[in-house]
């Protein structure tokens, strides 16, 4: 883990990330594979809609919960 604070994946946003959007593109990834985007509170809905419209969004969880699951 890095000491850097994770930032939002929205273009041009430098706000601290507080959400993880787990997704995959079924044309490219196996069903269990999860790519991630990070989101601040302001961009969570926009990024979720972007992925959801394409059928890519699998889960949205708080960053702290995601990190706990990965280290636990």
Image (spheres, rainbow, N blue to C red):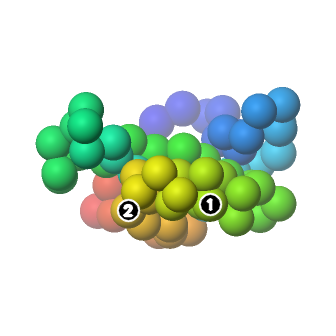
Q: Quadrant of the C terminus?
A: bottom left
Q: Is residue 49 visible?
A: yes
Asked which secondary structure carries label 2, the reply is: strand
Tell me if mark 1 has few (under 14), some (14-19) or many (20+) residues whose alpha carbon lies within 10 angstroms of its own: some
Asked which secondary structure carries label 1, the reply is: helix
Q: Is residue 20 visible?
A: no
What is the number of callouts on the image? 2
Q: Residue 58, labelled with which disc?
A: 2
Please identify, in this view, whether the residue under mark 1 or under mark 2 is nearer the observer: 1
Quadrant of residue 69 in the image?
A: bottom left
Q: Position of residue 15 (x, y in %)?
A: 82, 45
Q: Is residue 36 left or right of residue 31?
A: right
Q: Earlier in the sequence, mark 1 or mark 2?
A: 1
Residue closer to the observer: 4 or 59 = 59
Residue at the location (67% across, 39% down)?
9
Taking 48 as reference, is 33 above or below it? above
Q: Is residue 34 left or right of residue 39?
A: left
Q: Residue 17, labelled with which disc?
A: none
Q: Position of residue 44 (x, y in %)?
A: 69, 61
Q: Is residue 14 left or right of residue 37?
A: right
Real-space Cα separation, disc 1 to disc 2, in angstroms: 12 Å
Residue closer to the observer: 35 or 15 = 35
Q: Position of residue 63 (x, y in %)?
A: 55, 60
Q: Which residue is mark 1?
A: 49
Residue at the location (41% across, 52% down)?
56
Tell me if mark 2 has few (under 14), some (14-19) or many (20+) residues whose alpha carbon lies within 10 angstroms of its own: some
Q: Residue furthest front?
A: 53
Residue at the location (32% across, 55% down)?
70
Residue contact at pointers 1 and 2, CB within 8 angstroms: no
Residue at the location (46% across, 36% down)?
1
């Amino acid at each position: 883990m890095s000491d850097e604070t994770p930032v939002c994946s929205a273009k041009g946003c430098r706000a601290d990330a507080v959400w993880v959007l787990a997704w995959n593109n079924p044309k490219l990834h196996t069903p269990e594979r999860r790519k991630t985007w990070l989101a601040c509170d302001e961009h969570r809905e926009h990024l979720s809609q972007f992925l959801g419209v394409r059928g890519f969004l699998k889960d949205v969880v708080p960053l702290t919960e995601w990190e706990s699951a990965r280290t636990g």
